Amino acid sequence: MDLFISTALLLFLFVYLVYKSLAPPSYRLPPSPAVSLPIIGHLHLLKQPLHRHLRHLSRISGGPIFSLKLGVRRAVVVSSSELVEECFTRNDIIFANRPPALVDRYVGYNQTTLIGAPYGDHWRSLRRVGAQELLSAARINEFQQIRADEIRQLLSGLERASRHGFSRVTLRPRISELTFNVMIRMIAGKRYFTQEKEGEKGRFLEIINQVFEIAQASNPQDFLPFLQWIDYGGFKKKIIPLSKQLDGFFQILVDEHRREKRNTMIGHLLSHPDPDFYSDQTIKGLIMSMLLAGTDTSAATIEWAMALLVNHPHVLEKARKELDSHVGLHRLINEEDLSNLPYLRNIISETFRLFPVAPLLLPHQPSKDCVVGGYDIPRGTMLFVNAWAIHRDSNVWDEPNVFDPDRFEGKSQVETHKLMPFGMGRRACPGSGLGQRIVGLALGSLIQCFDWERTTVEEVEMDEGIGLTMPKLVPLEVMCRSREAMYEVIQQAITLA
């Protein structure tokens, strides 16, 4: 009897140890705002605009970190600067991964681009190419004339529209033309986006815009994989033909450069002595990353900034006086002037704060279990950083919902965990320097050369639309008139455009 009991106890202990070794570990997860439903989890709680609703869920959860069950995935949302600093300082390497997404499979060359690739040797090589070879200060300076030329094109179009006094203009298509052509000319040496949008140029632009729309939309198939069997929402039906067409356009650009040896970013990559790494797919992936990261983001920031300025004409006037004082009325602002225009930089910083074009930073995924804010974050969890909520946190900013460029007076830089328009940590955008130049030069030129007013007495609505880059819900329409004091300078710019 004693032998039987001893044997039973040993067998029980063995089974228990095996179970413990195979069972998933018990985690102390951040709190959730509600009970998780079968299969869908908390997907039913997500509403648009997502960054605003996630702040609401954070308040319900009672703290700056909470967790959600999104179908088969676990997500954690962080909404405080202290926790962001913890994620991207002590745990930076751990959070350097990206969660897989179907759009990266089809458009991002099976998650091998700078934006979507997992952290590892391949991504580090891409990052080095982006930061040191394509987006270094020296390389950006080589294409300064392109940016100046596209600014002249922008001014020329606005001058024609407002030649006979104040005229109503919609800024978004004009600014989009500017940012897209700056990027595509630096990359490929061609100007593809025109107001006429004819022929091959129009097709290329149309495909790019459709890819943007799909990439910006949330895809239920990412969270409920069984929906892929029936292609719920027609995602694959839409994305596969677009990805093939886009890849075809990129291949044409690469082949043209291989024949013609142009002095562009593609030409630089093709001249590299390591053809095994610098394959056509790698080069096309870099083209894709730069277009996605460098066009809509800058255009959206400029549009938000102009909307803020026409709602606050005293700020617009102060910026114009700074430009007239430091640049004058006899030439256009150039990139060298930007370092001598602190108030213009403050306006841009305040725009970044109130309307970050990545309100939820691109999601991260820990490569192993870690702890944030005293809570366990299991490997494979999706991490969302609500930059929009942090930028409007009253614990970080005085009167956080007020547009006040003077809050940055005398501050050469702000801690990145408090203001993060370009992300933070290893996966921060390597093109921040280029982005700030484009935004600064464009915004400075618009202020310097034209008078701006609202179309009505009422202030411009500042509601956010749905999308990855948080576009303005209603495209900005303003009254525009060439400044009399800058008339000759504008005419000279038109002649050179």
Image (cartoon, grey):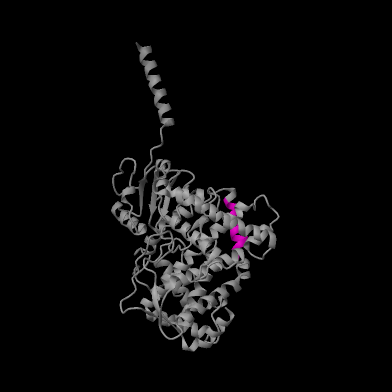
Q: Nearer the viewer, residue 244 or 463?
A: 244
Q: Nearer the viewer, residue 435 or 66?
A: 435
Task: State whether residue 178 is above or below residue 9.
Answer: below
How far across and down, in percent of the image, does residue 144 sit? 60, 72
Rendered residue at 40%/73% (across/down): 407
* The quarter of the displayed image where residue 142 is located: bottom right
Q: Is any part of residue 286 visible from this angle?
A: no
How far across and down, in percent of the image, does residue 154 sit? 51, 75
Residue furthest out toward the right:
273
Residue furthest out toward the top:
1
> Is 125 in the magenta?
yes
> Is 382 in the magenta?
no
How far across and down, in percent of the image, does residue 344 sit? 47, 76
> For the C terminus, which image quadrant?
bottom right
Residue 354 left/right relative to 37: right
Task: State whether residue 447 is above or below residue 90.
Answer: below
**Chief secondary structure of the magenta span?**
helix
Rendered residue at 41%/35% (across/down): 24
Give the residues in magenta.
123-136
Q: Is any part of residue 320 visible from this angle?
A: yes
How far across and down, in percent of the image, does residue 268 sit? 66, 61
Residue 137 left/right relative to 223: right
Rendered residue at 48%/43% (across/down): 368
Rendered residue at 63%/60% (across/down): 266
> For the N terminus, which image quadrant?
top left
Q: Nearer the viewer, residue 91 or 427?
A: 427
Numbered disc total:
0
Task: State whether residue 474 is above or below residue 50.
Answer: below
